Image (spheres, rainbow, N blue to C red):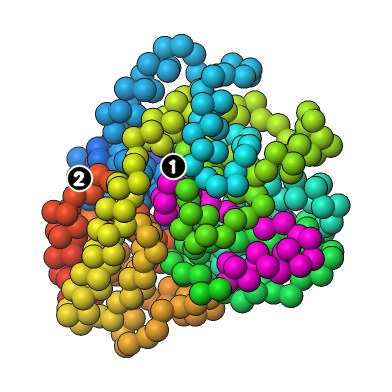
Amino acid sequence: MTSNKGWFDRAQVVIPGGVDSPVRSFRSVGGTPLTITRGEGAYVDDVEGTRYLDYVQSYGASLLGHAHPLVVGVLQQAATKGTTFGAPTPGEVVLAEAMTARVRGLEQVRFVSSGTEAVMSAVRLARGQTGRDKIIKFEGCYHGHSDALLVAGGSGVAQMGLPGSAGVTAGAVQDTFVAPYNEVPTLDETVAAVLVEPVAANMNLVAPREGFLVGLRQECDRVGALLIFDEVITGFRLALGGAEEYFHVTPDLWCFGKVIGGGLPVGAFGGSRAILASLAPEGPVYQAGTLSGNPLATAAGLAVLNNVKPDDLAILSERVTNFASELQGAIRDAGLFALTPSVGALMGLYLARDEVTAPTNFDEARVLCENGLYAPFFHAMLERGVALAPGAYEILFVSLAHTREDLERTVSIAAEAAKAVTK
């Protein structure tokens, strides 16, 4: 079997829709998903032997790029000692120490196996800690696929055109309330927590307005609610101390994933010792996981955190800022209007026929994501050897492995792709 179509046909027999995550499908852009056989740095190869310059990077998990030699070496060594024990290991302690040392206000963390688990557990902890039921989330922010948080989600939920998900009961979401992103809601004493992406990165990219995160902090403090930062994407990518360091706003609870696993399945949630004391076995809030703190994931995550220095993220941020500007200019010169908002090392890409302003919420982002331009542009880039995420609601992930030459080549290819779309 040597073709993407062949593997996809085979997958559809035994895997629903042929994919293990809807965002991997090409449903919103059309065509056949690539079946990837290997990755190296900024590049991936498919089963047909075609190499692509990759801006998916496992949706942000690969900060150092694919198959970084340091991470591979650490994994090879760790695997010889055993892959899972169902018991405490030194690795989880050392990774937790590394995380708490970098993020101001983060005193303890508990590891889980995915970002979904991390957010789900943080919400449960917030409810248990406060004795309240209501959760406020923001339209277009994706926080994993747990029942109570799928309502008005971004990412794959938006790409599939779904308001939520079948199978989620009214009771499961009755205590979840949705507010527009970038607007500070008025809370009352029934609210347990406000859950937010510090930078919205699942409705393409929407930056927080000046004062938005500070306003959330103040409003939570006013009524005794907890502020939860979903840093599955922003954690250790915006800055070594994450969104707290970047925006100087300290939440009560954090949720992490992606970068802290070095490319392996992982998640974590944490906060102060006082709040985490409510977790079992010390407190009444139950949470557990057989593979939590997996020794391979913690080894890989620690290797990444120890290998990334503040200057590295500063350089990456500057590189992304320049790349965003050049990409936007090249696409516009070729006949399409483009917006490439960036926050630190995160960047988005919106396409339009006419000049528009940068979205500030999901309703504004949706207009641009659903205008029909992304799909032809995506395929024009793919045909020229550049892999973007197969959906307009996702962002571009530039890793530390992407060189200036890679970015310059992407800008040139994007100009060609834009010309092809305008024709």
Q: Image quadrant of residue 383?
A: bottom left
| Percent of width and height locating residue 282 | 79, 30
* Image quadrant where one finds the N terminus: top left
**Residue at (14% x, 59% y) in the render:** 409
* The residue positioned farthest toward the bottom in the image shown: 354
Q: Which mark is residue 259?
A: 1
**Residue at (51% x, 38% y) in the render:** 101
Which secondary structure, mark 1?
helix
| Percent of width and height locating residue 79 | 43, 17
Viewer-proximal residue among 110 and 153: 110
Task: First in sequence, mark 1 or 2: give its number.
Answer: 2
Q: Of tags 1 and 2, which is closer to the observer?
A: 1
Q: Up-down: is 338 above or below 174?
A: below
User: What span is colored magenta in the figure?
Assistant: 212-240
Q: Amino acid at mark 2?
A: Arg
Q: Is residue 133 visible?
A: yes
Q: Residues within 10 Å of mark 1 (few under 14, many from 20)?
A: many
Viewer-proximal residue among 161 and 148: 148
Q: List the residue tagged with mark 2.
A: 51
Q: Amino acid at mark 1?
A: Val
Does residue 102 appear left or right of residue 288 in this picture? left
Residue 133 lies in the magenta-colored region: no
Does residue 53 appear left or right of residue 354 in this picture? left
Count the numbered circles shown. 2
